[in-house]
Image: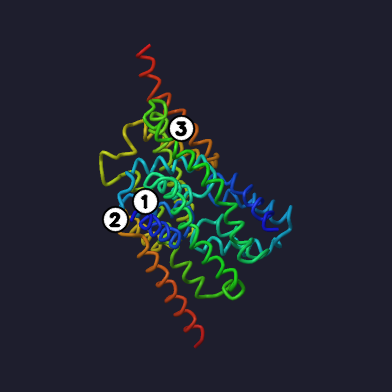
Amino acid sequence: MLWQLFISFLKIGCFTFGGGYAMIPLIEREVIDRKAWIARADFLDLLTLAQSAPGPISLNTAVFVGYKIRGLAGAVASLAGVVIPSFVIILVVAIFFADVRNNAVVDAAFKAMRPAVVALIVAPIVGLARGMHAWLIALAAAVALLVWGTGLSPIYLLIAGAAAGLAWSAWIVRKEGK
Amino acid sequence: MIYLQLFISYLKIGFFGFGGGYAMLSLIQNEVVGQRGWLTASEFADIVAISQITPGPIAINSATYIGYEIAGVWGSVVATIAVCLPALTVMLMITKFFLALKDNTYVKGVVSGMKPVVVGMICSAALMLMFPADKADANFIDTWSWVFFLAVLYGAYRKINPILLIVLSALGGIVVYWLPAAMATL
């Protein structure tokens, strides 16, 4: 069973191009349709949690499914499975990239890929901001300027945001309690 | 002690990596480019590009790559394990208290309080790559840079596969930056 978990997540790890959301259909097919390890309703709850927890969604999902099936050993087996493909591929790239980095063709390709990467980061921002209140957007803008302009670690701002959210919900609970 | 520094940096990145890959970029960049100075802004952009066209989350990819650059194969092992540990421990706790946490008002409050910060972090990652502190380190070098930027932005908006967009811009870069010089030497 541990071996099966490892192999399933190894497969998932090999094909998770383009971030966490792209792999969700892959996990669904492997873990729900093929292996029937967890129920579809549990999977949806899992997604909400995996998104709110720190760390990449793919790792969080692997830990959750592995733990449900075989406890701690299962969690470690599926985590190893999902991590190993990207670890091996990037290690190979890192070892050889130093040699080709100064190649004129590679250099030309990377000159264009850098602004392309920035565009991929900018693209989802509009969608994320759409559902937000105007003053929350202003807050997000302030965070962006602070981190970019002063080099302040975003960790402090995350903690502040979490604390503010906690205080807000405590206030709501008290108000509704009265 | 370089292994310890790598371990601590990536443990931090793993533990505070809320909001998915692009938000984590801000964290990774702040730690690796800003605080530690292990990479320049354009080297960082290169890793993000490589990460887009290889499988796996950017957190893992950057840990493996930077670990190797800084301290060889063992460096990449240390950094990769460090970035996985928080996901493992935090998710195990969450899985244990799954039902209690699911509809908890306070958990929802914390998550919604972090949301504007996460959006701001994504913006700051973009800003830092567009306007790095060190001008010599620019990712936008000429008008073509803006052409590629706008073309990919439009492609992403039209939901074209990001891997395809990166590969197309690499080809575009070869045509624009390499071909004229190669033709001239013929």
Quadrant the N terminus of chain A occupies: bottom right
| Residue type, mark 3 in image | Ser
- Co-location on one chain, circles 2 and 3: no
* Residue to which mark 2 is pinned: A151
* Mark 1–mark 3 distance (CA, rounded to whole Å): 23 Å
Tell me which label, 1 or 3, sits earlier in the chain: 1
* Residue to which mark 3 is pinned: B169
Dividing the picture into quadrants, the one containing residue B41 is: top left
* Residue to which mark 1 is pinned: B29
Circle 3 residues within 10 Å: few <14, some 14–19, many ≥20: many
Give coordinates of residue B172: x percent, y percent.
44, 28
| Residue type, mark 2 in image | Gly
Give coordinates of residue B62: x percent, y percent.
44, 48
- Residue at horizontal 41 percent and vertical 45 percent from the top: B72
* Mark 2–mark 1 distance (CA, rounded to whole Å): 10 Å
Q: In front: B185, or A22?
A: B185
Judge from the rendering whether residue A134 lies leftward or rightward of residue A60; answer left or right: left
Depicted A169 relative to depicted A55: above or below: below
- Mark 3, chain letter? B
Q: In front: B16, or B79?
A: B79
Give coordinates of residue B52: x percent, y percent.
49, 42
Local secondary structure at mark 2: loop
| Residue type, mark 1 in image | Gln
Task: Say which of marks 2 and 3 sits in front.
Answer: 2
- Residue at horizontal 56 percent and vertical 67 percent from the top: B92
* Circles 2, 1 touching at the beta carbon (< 8 Å): no
Task: Say which of marks 1 and 3 sits in front.
Answer: 1
Circle 1 residues within 10 Å: few <14, some 14–19, many ≥20: many
Depicted A7 relative to depicted A37: above or below: above
